[in-house]
Image (spheres, coloured by chain):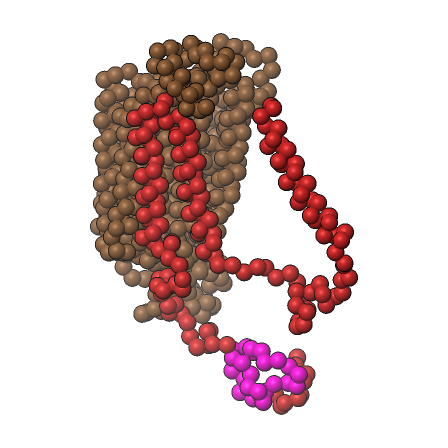
Chain colours: A red, B brown
Amino acid sequence: MDQYLPIVLLLVVALAFAAGSFAASKLLGPSRPTGAKTGPYESGIVPQAPVAARFPVRFFLVAMIFIIFDIEVIFLYPWAVIYHQLNTFGLAEMAAFALVVFVSFAYLVSNGALDWGPVKKLARKAPVNLTRTTTSTVRRVPRPDQLIDGMSPRPVDSEPEPTAEPVGAGAPEA
Amino acid sequence: MIGLLSHTLVGQTVQAPATGCQVTPGKVTGLCQAFNSLHIPVEYRTILPLLVLSIGALVLLVISAVLPKRSRPGLYPLLTVIISGLAAGASVFQWIDVGNHAATKAIGNQIFYDRFSVLFMLLISVATLFGALLSDSYLQREGLDGVEAYVLMLLASTGAMLMAASAGTIMLFLGLEIMSIALYVMTAYHRRRAASGEGGLKYFILGSFSSAIFLYGAALAYGATGTTQFDEMSVFLARTTLPNDGILLGGMALLIVGLGFKVAAVPFHFWSPDVYEAAPTPFTGYMAAVAKAAGFAGLFRVLLEGFHSQEANWRPAIWLIAVLTLLVGSVLAIAQRDLKRMMAYSSISQAGYVLIGLQSASSQGTAGALFYLLTYTFIIAGTFAVIGLVQGEGEARNDLGAIRGLGRRRPGLALVMLLFLLAQAGVPFTSGFLAKFYVIAAAVNRGQYALAIIGMLAAAIAAFFYLRVGLLMYSSPEVDETKEPTDGAALAGLRPIPGFDTPREPALSQGPGAVAASSDGDGAVALLAPPEGRVEIPFTVGITLAVCAAFTIFAGVSSPVLDFAKHATTYF
């Protein structure tokens, strides 16, 4: 147990330092918050709800690739520790294991998992749906002269409306 | 420090047995034993089919990495067929090899090398072969062609084989996970079908849950018996009377639940219709054969080897599960409008018969169950091959109406489908009859008359929906149109427009026109007009259908396959 004492001490010191730093900045720093200061931007639109941080989905891929190689290293380590006991058998087994991981690596590379930068080749496109027509696909937006005062341009039904309501009539038909 | 220690140990390992380690007693003894036991002789021939499949999967990956993308359509399925053929060959070699020598435990006592596991290896190899043959045309039709499907299939088969050969709960769990993870991905493989992803996620979540339950059961069983090895468990339980067997029973129950999920036994079946419907059709057939067989292999290993002496405790539980599985599967299948969902419930009901064989806990019951699984592999591969053909591109039509009038459009295809349906219904001169006969005979021999009668009743209920599909195939495709009442527009909108392969939602079968058409004596299921145009049978699918049909008749009229299954009941 004695030999672990320095580690425990180090842990305690690290925690104490971190906690102390937080406490010190809280106590020593002046704190006069205002509404404008606490907002994400001092000028601009007040956010309505917390916004999800955006990051490329590629990070998930990298994380998964990392796990593959992380696991390889984790298995390599105990093998290295008892290398002498395992002898040729262990070497052969580890070689087989490393080969399996390498094959997955080769597969990853060939599929462009490690290509960075703007994506050049796009994914295979879905075949165009033959049922698409102009009425089902194109959104019809009212002309400016059809707009009711103060209304933002919004799509209306795709049903053609031969006689437009007079501008400013306001009341929707029952 | 470590170096010194290991050098000391090297000397010890070479000369002294495990108990002779005296390096700083009390501290290193455990380690020292661990070091000694690391020298495990690996008898590679005992896992030959597994090696073939897993190395084959790696080879496929390497080839796909080296070749340009989509360079050769048909290359990967061809290689998969060769690999699974080699695995089947290896299984045959093993069968002869086990016959010449005694059944043994191998590889650190983790693998049973007996005819029971070899039979499953053969079964799984064959199912993989069919899976590859059927996937080729389907994946090309759906624009999903790629190496991944075949690699996943090979890996799932490896896991399934490992389950069948496992000599302990640890290996069983490893096999279960290897198989399941590949199957989750295979279910979600159809990227452009929303249902496919949904089914994959459902399967993944419920499957992980059941794996956790299984693992908990294994832990409790270990706590009660002090071992994870089935044979040691059996010896321990035969020798010892536990004063308080709550932990043992709890472990046993959780193991049954975990494996019962994999074989889709009621009440652990809820995932099955969704997943069967969602997965690409050839994968559904593959899953129905392989996952079910492997799950049952695990159940047999656990219950008949590990808990053999606890028969009195688990047989009532399996009795109840078998009855529920038989009745719920048969009855709910009648209410299905979707072909794949109907086959999912049908496959639940079929699992009930294997459970009857398991419940008998006799070598006759095991032989019947093995024969059942073996023949079902061929039947289900053939059935889903036909469904894959009639459903059309994009799995547009999975409803029962899609198969209507098949007898006129493709008489040969309809005849083969009829054979598979009759086999599943248990009509004589098909393998399905003998399979049902032997499991029920095994139940009768153990005095389980009630179970036998329920089994026969369930077969009678199930015959209804099998025969309904059969009749639909031979009913005229024009019936709907002549009987079409007033609401013609609704149905006309559902008919394919010439020149446009319009995908239609199966949900439309509940539309007004379809409901009106349901009054022509086809039961409560509303039907759409069958798709027009010819059903093309690709070469690979044709071969599979021919082989499956031939086997279904062959196993139904002669005895070699049954003898084969009987030989496999000799456990280690």
- Quadrant in which residue A146 is drawn: bottom right
- Foreground residue among B215 and B403: B215
| Residue name at image x 76 percent, y 58 percent | A30
Q: Give residue B145's position: percent from left, percent from top.
A: 31, 54
Q: Give residue B13's position: percent from left, percent from top.
A: 37, 15
Task: Using the image, determine if residue B216 lies above or below residue B348.
Answer: above
| Residue name at image x 36 percent, y 22 percent | A85
- Foreground residue among B398 and B422: B398
State yes or no: residue A160 in magenta: yes
Q: Give residue B396's position: percent from left, percent from top.
A: 39, 58
Task: Give the overall secondary structure of the magenta segment.
Answer: loop
Stretch of the chain drawn in magenta:
A140-163
Question: In this rendering, does residue A166 appear at all?
Answer: yes
- Quadrant in which residue A164 is drawn: bottom right
- Foreground residue among B32 and B211: B32
| Residue name at image x 41 percent, y 13 percent | B18
Of the 4 image quadrants, the one containing the N terminus of chain B is: top left
Task: Using the image, determine if residue B363 lies above or below residue A40.
Answer: above
State yes or no: residue A158 in magenta: yes
| Residue name at image x 41 percent, y 55 percent | B191
Total numbered badges shown on the rendered structure = 0
Question: In this rendering, does residue B351 appear at all?
Answer: no
Of the 4 image quadrants, the one containing the C terminus of chain B is: top left
Q: Give residue B545's position: percent from left, percent from top.
A: 26, 44
Task: Using the image, determine if residue B188 lies above or below residue A170.
Answer: above
Could you tell whether B317 is left or right of B477 in the image?
A: right
